[in-house]
Amino acid sequence: MSENTIEERVPTAEISDSIPVKYTSLQLKEAGTIEKITYTSYDYFGDGAEVTKEANVYLPYGYDESKKYDVLYLMHGIGGDENEWGMTGINSRVKIIMDNLAYFGDIRPFIVVTPNGRSAANHAANGSDYHSFYCFGQELRNDLIPYIEAHYSIYGEKDSEDYELSGSRDHRAMAGLSMGGMQTINIGIGECVDLFSYFGAFSAAPTSNTAAKTAEILEGNELPIHYFYNICGTEDGIAYASASAAAKKLPEVCDQFAEGENFLWQELPGGHDFNIWYLGFYNFAQIAFR
Ligand code: FER
């Protein structure tokens, strides 16, 4: 074997039960960047007052304003904030996985945004009311997506007169861990199917809509759901029951989901932790925008 074997750009990623080392190794040759943004939103949970919200944005290596990029909105859990996915420095695992999937040619590079999922004046990881997680759909639609699409080179013509958010739903994905998985199900699929077409729920939290509820919400929906990916650890005492109820039988109760076509339920030994969530991210990154 040549000593350069690992450098060869051979796309080998697949949906799997562990992330190959090749995709978690820091490579600095073609690394993306992460920037912190702030944008104006409102206290949708409280009195509607103006709030400055924070988010992290991963831009792929070679990000070029003359090109267009797809965007994944990646949500955190109940105890976290915009930094919980660790998208804060060169050692960020999300960034490293994205950099390597792009470097080896497994994916077409896309933008990843990690927002703070509490739509309230008090959106701190500790001491804020978790009920504000359920109001995030308004922030996403009214404030965050418009901000991202005004500041980055995204599909859809933000500057054109007839710009409509729904026009570029093929180019948006939403995913999240635990409460963020709940948000993907309840808000992404439940309230914003006109804005997103790819969804990922990792260990979706107890208040996630059940499969029957999602089927009811989607009755009559004609917008194509390109993919709904789910993962959960079988030893996850917090989310296994709820994530299963939300998704496992979804294809049986809703003909808009077909296992192996636009739907995947993945379960494997594991708990309520980042071993499952980074694996979920790695798998979902290959599924989104295909
Ligand atoms: C609950 C247990 C866990 C719940 C949410 C969670 C809203 C969320 C966990 C997480 O985000 O990690 O009863 O109810």
Image (spheres, rainbow, N blue to C red):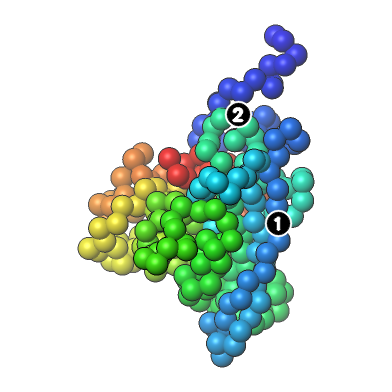
Query: Answer yes or no: do the residues labelled 2 and 1 have beta carbons within 8 Å?
Result: no
Number of numbered discs overlaid on the protein picture: 2
Q: Quadrant of the N terminus?
A: top right
Q: Pick out the residue farthest to the top.
A: 1
Give the left or right position of residue 217, taking residue 280 as reference: left
Circle 2: element type: loop
The kind of residue on which mark 1 rests is Glu
Please tell me whether mark 1 sits on a helix, a strand or a loop: strand
Q: Which residue is mark 2?
A: 104
- Within 10 Å of the Cα at label 1, are there few (<14), some (14-19), or many (20+) other Cα atoms? few
Q: Find residue 101 and report its image quarter.
A: top right
Q: Residue 42 location in percent, x, y? A: 57, 81
Task: Report the quarter where the C terminus lies.
Answer: top left
The residue depicted at 52 percent of the width and 61 percent of the height is: 149
- 147 above or below 251? below
Q: Report the residue that reaches farthest toward the left.
A: 220
Q: Position of residue 273 (x, y in %)?
A: 65, 52
Whole-percent x, y for residue 261 in the image: 34, 40
Does 218 appear above or below 289? Answer: below
Q: Nearer the viewer, mark 2 or mark 1?
A: 1
Q: Which residue is mark 1?
A: 35
Question: For the residue marked with disc 2, what is the amino acid?
Answer: Phe
Q: How far apart are labels 2 and 1 at the CA level?
A: 24 Å
Q: Is residue 260 left or right of residue 14?
A: left
Residue at 53%, 82% in the rendered image: 44
**In this rendering, position of residue 4 left or right of residue 219:** right
Asked if residue 289 can be seen in this view, the reply is yes
| Picture coordinates of residue 18, whole percent (x, y) | 60, 35
Residue 141 against residue 231 in the figure, above or below: below
